[in-house]
Amino acid sequence: MAASLNRASVKFGNFTALRDISLDIEAGDFWTILGPSGCGKSTMLRLVSDLVPPASGTVEILGKTTEAARLAREFAFVFQDATLLPWRSALKNVELPLEIGRKRGINIPTGERSPRELLELVGLKGREDALPHELSGGMRQRVAIARALVCQPKLLLMDEPFGALDEMTRDHLNLQLLDIWRETGTTILFVTHSIPEAIFLGQKVLMLKANPGRVKDVVEVDLPFPREIALRDTPQFNSYCARLRALLEDC
Amino acid sequence: MSVTETAVENVATERMLSAQSRTRLVNIAIPLGTAVALLLIWQIGVRVFEVPIYIAPAPTDVLHVFQTDFALLLRNFWPTFLESLAGFFIGNMAAILIAVAFVHSRLVERAFFPIAVFINTIPILAIAPILVLIFGPGMTAKVVIAALICFFPTLVNMVRGLQSVSPQTLELARILSASKSEVFWKIRLPSSLPFLFSALKIASTTCVIGAIVGEWIGANVGLGALIIESTFNFRSPLLYATVFVSSGLSVLLFASVTIAEKLIVRW
Ligand SMILES: Nc1ncnc2c1ncn2[C@@H]1O[C@H](COP(=O)(O)OP(=O)(O)OP(=O)(O)O)[C@@H](O)[C@H]1O
Ligand SMILES: [Mg+2]
């Protein structure tokens, strides 16, 4: 089990952002998360990544507490904007997780791939020395993905990572992400606003509803891998879209 | 990226560069031309209306002083230069360290920020005589005045710079379980550099003002002392020349800071 939530709730003061979330996420799964704006999707990822504590209930990652998992670098986070350090080159940004804690003698798990190889994996070979402001939005997001992979996390949390990108770049990065998922075998939790993106990427789509945030439904996407862009024009794909849109509308 | 795309981009950048260098040339030529024209008007005006030299010397009179009294100007340049530089380093260093303390402890900030604001509200001209009384007529008083005048803008900018880290970047640091000192050295300090440099640019010109004000009050060397002396002796060409040297010093310091910024802040 990569992550399991048991009746977990999150409160901000008196406001209940999430209530009674129970989920079991199998290792190696690709989950996408959909829901109306403000329903608590980001909060759920922040709960799993130990950024906000549960008000009640429990969250476990690979059988550990979220804090222990964070200290062991079991998970990594990709934010909507790439959150690169602007004074560091692409390569130096990817190396950042390896530098944090090194002087304190903390044992940092390193993957089989070096930062350089990870940049190559996300298609940025030759741009290692570029500063973030010299890269396009899509390239910056790919650097952020490479940075997230550098400690070989077992769980990858992504909060609308491609939300600010144009359609073409987004398609391209979706395919690349599926390749990375297949190659690394990591578990992915992926928040998105786009119904087609959620279906195209996910094995399971988690639908949340608002006020307070709860699980509305988990839809299994029974479409074969590896997936191609052309899949989106098939009737099955479109029927999934219609079904999720209907679900989203009565949230 | 394909080869043709790169080629097209190269041509585009080249065209942009040449356009850029042309606008840069125009940007230099216009103010330079204006300055030369103003100097000419000044020269002709002084000569045509036969203005006495002690009221307004012609540019050529001032130029003449640079030839005859160069050693005198230089002898008074060095003390002011050293005072400005020492004040610049001490004042900014103190501001940076106190800003770091403020950002790390809200208690320290609450205790000392009002005092810093209060010190800043005292006009430098009012506090300068007090400092000269305390530290005597030597260089120390001038260095302290120059440091004081640099202090506040740098403090405010540095605090803002250290706090300019986005919440998401701090979340990233937390997910990586970064320690407080790692957040400081790897994230906060580099983020503050653009803010610090804009403060240092201000300080690079005000520290010269501080040193000169200090010299007005009590000194027998330095550009400030020379300004007072040449004014009382009606040596206007020398006064004008001293003023030019003073602003030259400011420009020198400002340019050094700008060059350092170009080299360090490359993002
Ligand atoms: N730090 C916080 N303090 C108080 N309320 C918060 C905080 N963070 C989130 N909330 C509230 O919790 C709710 C869920 O927020 P969250 O950011 O998780 O929504 P979301 O589903 O990610 O929305 P979006 O799709 O717009 O990104 C919102 O109503 C928000 O106002
Ligand atoms: Mg969100």
Image: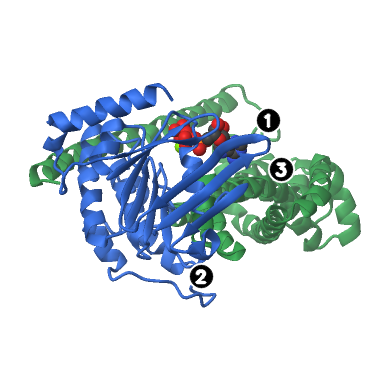
Chain colours: A blue, B green
Label 3 CA crowd tier, 10 Å (few <14, some 14–19, many 20+) = some
Tell me where residue A238 appears, x and y as whole percent.
Answer: 19, 28
Q: How far apart are marks 1 and 2 (CA)?
A: 73 Å
Q: What element carries label 3?
A: loop
Residue to which mark 2 is pinned: A101
Label 1 with label 3: CB-CB less than 8 Å: no
* Mark identifier at residue A31: none
Residue to which mark 3 is pinned: B235
Tell me where residue B164 appears, x and y as whole percent.
Answer: 57, 45
Foreground pick, B114 / B147 = B114
Mark 1 and mark 3 lie on one chain; the one further toward the N terminus is 1
Tell me where residue A240 appears, x and y as whole percent.
Answer: 24, 31
Residue to which mark 1 is pinned: B52
Image quarter where the N terminus of chain A lies is bottom left
* Residue type marked 1: Pro
Label 1 CA crowd tier, 10 Å (few <14, some 14–19, many 20+) = few
Q: Is residue B246 visible?
A: no
Instruction: Give the chain letter at badge 3.
Output: B
Q: Is residue A156 visible?
A: yes
With A152 as the anchor, is B141 left or right in this view? Answer: right
Instruction: Give the chain letter at badge 2.
Output: A
Q: Judge depth for marks 1 and 2 and give the one in front.
A: 2
